[in-house]
Image (cartoon, rainbow, N blue to C red):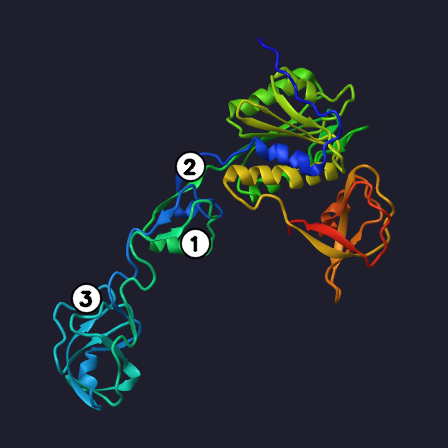
Amino acid sequence: MTKQVWVLAVALLSVAEALERVLAQAAPLPAEEVPLVEADGRVLAYDLKARRTQPPADVSAMDGYAVRAADFAAAPVRLKVIGEVAAGRPFAAAIGPGETARIFTGGVLPSGADAVVVQELARRDGDYVVMEKSTSKGRNVRPQGLDFRAGDTLFAKGHRLNARDLQLAAGMNHPLVPVHRRPKVALFATGDELVPPGTEPGPGQIVYSNGFALAALIREEGAEVVDLGVVGDKLEATIAAIRDARAVGADVLVTTGGASVGEYDFINRAFAAEGAALSFWKIAMRPGRPLMHGRRGGMHMLGLPGNPVSSYVCAFLFLVPLIRRLCGRSDLAAPTESAVLGCDLAENDERADYLRATLSDSPNGPVATPFPTQDSSMMAPLAKADCLLIRAPHAPPAKAGSRCEIVRLPR
């Protein structure tokens, strides 16, 4: 078997460079047609054209009487009622001079009629109706094609569908819509020390938590999760889990833990054994330095650190944009914004910092205050955080009240 060559970076990559490499190897997944009830949040793979004209004919916008505006040269007028028009029950006869038909909202305007007088302005007198005020052509009428016409392109390729869009697509007479296939993301953790929630941990054991956050994040982004569970610290077991991910047809494999250089860190060796081409390993950020990305055939492989905060932050910054690209979305990374720094910060080192912080209001905009302790094992501050405060490598000391850059976390 031919040995695969790894592509390793000599120096630590910046966050921007690492994200660029992740996305450079990703493209929207092929199209599939899905029912409207399954299309919310999905991205169109092709333009969507109207299959019908709406409304298909001139219809009444009000309950009232279909009339000829020409009959209203002088008011009041007295017209003979020759029929009734309800929505879905058109009137076959034409409206002639001196005639009218009772009509209800949505009813097709009879031939000869060109306006509708609302019922509040009409007084019924047996087979006749008296109208005191004049009207004009087109009054209270929704003309044919007012909303859209057959053949109109109402949604462009790449548009992400929402609830209002589904209403319109249904009105366009589309029972199915062409969208990019949902990515399938396989997920497993490594570590002999991990036990499931509800278990009483033994000496040296910890409760497994990363997978629950990652699976929720993956589903929120519209991807399917295949949870492969927890794998022990053995090379053979790690290789077997990678093969399981390939066997289920995963578009992305996400691992947590085992991505560093310790004797029990097997992810890099397992990736190599399976012939993965690594695009980078280790990046200049905190938390999350031992982040790994590669590909094996058509499967993207993202090795996240094992510490809970590192795992989530790396998934938020790299996995979410990857999933969005595969889904066909153009809004890949969460936007950054300016905020007011809530406390003094010391000079930064060579890595970009992503500090968990809370947000409060001020006349000058949101105030971002980092938690005093930023250890990557601490889940409580992450759960309470509103945003990540971004500090560039080698950033100088910063004073409270100065401007800073943040990215908001999902809520």
Q: Which mark is residue 90?
A: 3
Looking at the picture, how far across and down is residue 210, in whole percent?
68, 36
Instruction: Using a 10 Å C-alpha cutoff, classify the residue at mark 2 as few (fewer than 14 neighbours), some (14 to 19) or many (20 or more).
Output: some
Residue located 20% across and 90% down the image: 74
Name the mark on residue 292: none
Give the Cα separation between the discs numbered 2 and 3: 41 Å
Residue type for callout 3? Pro
Q: Quadrant of residue 197?
A: top right
| Element class at badge 2 | strand
Q: Which residue is mark 1?
A: 165
Of the numbered discs 1 and 3, the one sitting upstream in the chain is 3
Give the CA separation, mark 1 to mark 2.
Answer: 18 Å
Contact? badges 1 and 3 (CB < 8 Å):
no
Q: On the rendered image, what quadrant is the N terminus found in?
A: top right
Determine which residue is flagged by label 2: 31
Judged from the image, the secondary structure of the residue bearing numbered disc 3 is loop
Residue 404 in sight: yes
Mark 3 surroundings: few (<14), some (14-19) or many (≥20) residues within 10 A? some
Circle 2 or circle 3, nearest the eye? 2
Location of residue 172 in the rendering, given as x and y in whole percent from the top left corner? 33, 53
Q: State how far apart marks 1 and 3 are (Cα).
A: 29 Å
**Which corner quadrant of the image does residue 234 belong to?**
top right
Residue kind at label 1, given as amino acid type: Asp
Residue at point 46% right, 54% down? 163
For discs 1 and 3, the disc positioned in front in the rendered view:
1
Residue at the spot 52% in from the left edge and 43% down from the top edge: 329
Secondary element at tag 1: helix
Report x, y in % for residue 22: 61, 33
| 10 sits to left or right of 63 | right
